[in-house]
Image (spheres, rainbow, N blue to C red):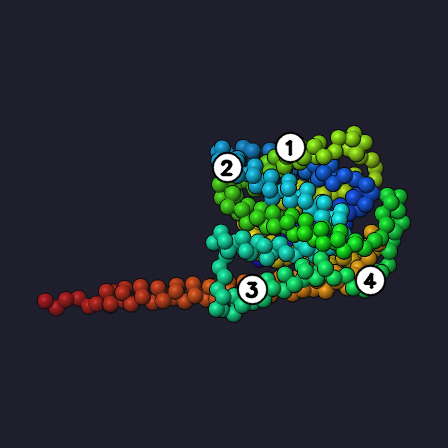
Amino acid sequence: MGEKKPYLAVLLVQSIYGGMFMLSKAAFNGGMNNYVFVFYRQAAATLFLAPFAFYFEWKNRPTLSFVTFCKIFFLSLFGISLSLDICGIGIVYASATLAAAISNCIPVVTFFLAVLLRMEVLKLRSVSGIAKIVGIIACIAGAITLALYKGPHFNLLCLHHLFESHGIVSHVPSSQTRIKGCFLLFVSNTLWGLWLVLQGRVLKDYPSKLLFITLQCFLSTIQLFTIAIGFERDPREWELGWNVRLLAVAYCGIVVTGVTFYLQAWIIEKKGPVFLAMSTPVTLVFTMFFSAILLCEIITLGSVLGGLMLVAGLYSVLWGKSKEEKMNDAKCLKAEVDKERSEFKQVVPVETKGPSLV
């Protein structure tokens, strides 16, 4: 059961992210300002995580040097604050389904960054390397299809009355808006991929995962407030009522940021950043289905085809990585066996040597 825990954890994480895309889009469609929303979700996450962090890890906390603090500050700025703000704008321009589909580019971006930082290896002349290249090409083709091609529309069973009081209506983004939204979402995912890769390195300097995540949430809350107050100064836009806005803030702040950030840190520690990023197709399936039903989003053929290309590309890269890991494990096992045989040959003659007759 212990070996299955990382797989169950990534399924939970990606399902939670699917709910995030759907509720975020519902709040934006209801008129909530993106910058205010992102600030509130990070503030909620900080308030939720802080008591647990202080209770469980404060007494045994490692020393936080100034250099490590600066690393965490900039990791929060680019990987959380800017990534979430840009993602929110992208969702406003596009749709929850497109946001979930574009998020499948994260593994490709993460893989490239991991290769550049020498955390992953790309062997172009091997079968695993070819599979990774094919996967990357398929992801690029899928992203282009999502941005440029619409095709026929599909309407699923819509429970529009669930959100009708917030002015949510089904729509298909225009071509220009669609391209702009996809571009912003890709930029956001690039920053997110960088956050996934660099997080593993910073955790080595500050291994207390809960304090590490809480500090990032606290710093990003300050950063996001500075950004939000610069773009939105109307007090009415900062009001929260008993509606989908409050639900989205609470869900994204407590469940998404508070719970999944900790789970992600645990998964990265156990399996690495690429393993986590490869599970993102679950988010697309979840978001496409429930957004069509609850938000009345119209599914286009371009979204389906682009999503399938992205998923196929991701699993091609995943297969290549899995095959490469098996080959490395086999080489390590062979090296250990050869070493044991060599040591055995050196020891046996000494142990079986008889007493001298002289």
x 56%, y 33%: residue? 58
Q: Which residue is mark 1?
A: 222
Q: Which residue is mark 3?
A: 132
Describe the element under mark 2 as helix, strand or loop.
helix
Please, what is the three-letter code of the amino acid marked with disc 2? Thr
Left or right of 55 on screen, residue 182? right
Crowding near the residue tagged with mark 4, few <14, some 14–19, many ≥20 C-alpha atoms within 10 Å: few
Position of residue 114 relative to residue 34, above or below, is: below
Marks 2, 4: nearer the viewer: 4
Please, what is the three-letter code of the amino acid marked with disc 1? Ile
Quadrant of res 102: bottom right
Position of residue 128 relative to residue 176, above or below, is: below
Earlier sequence position, callout 2 versus callout 4: 2
Across and down, in percent, residue 74 comes to 56, 39
> How far apart, in angstroms, are the residues tagged by discs 1 and 4?
42 Å
Across and down, in percent, residue 250 comes to 74, 40
Describe the element under mark 3 as helix, strand or loop.
helix
Across and down, in percent, residue 121 comes to 48, 59
Crowding near the residue tagged with mark 2, few <14, some 14–19, many ≥20 C-alpha atoms within 10 Å: some
x 68%, y 42%: residue? 85
Q: Which residue is mark 2?
A: 68
x 51%, y 43%: residue? 202
Q: Which mark is residue 153?
A: 4
Earlier sequence position, callout 1 versus callout 3: 3
Marks 1, 4: nearer the viewer: 4
Which of 80/85 is in front?
85
Describe the element under mark 1 as helix, strand or loop.
helix
x 76%, y 39%: residue? 33
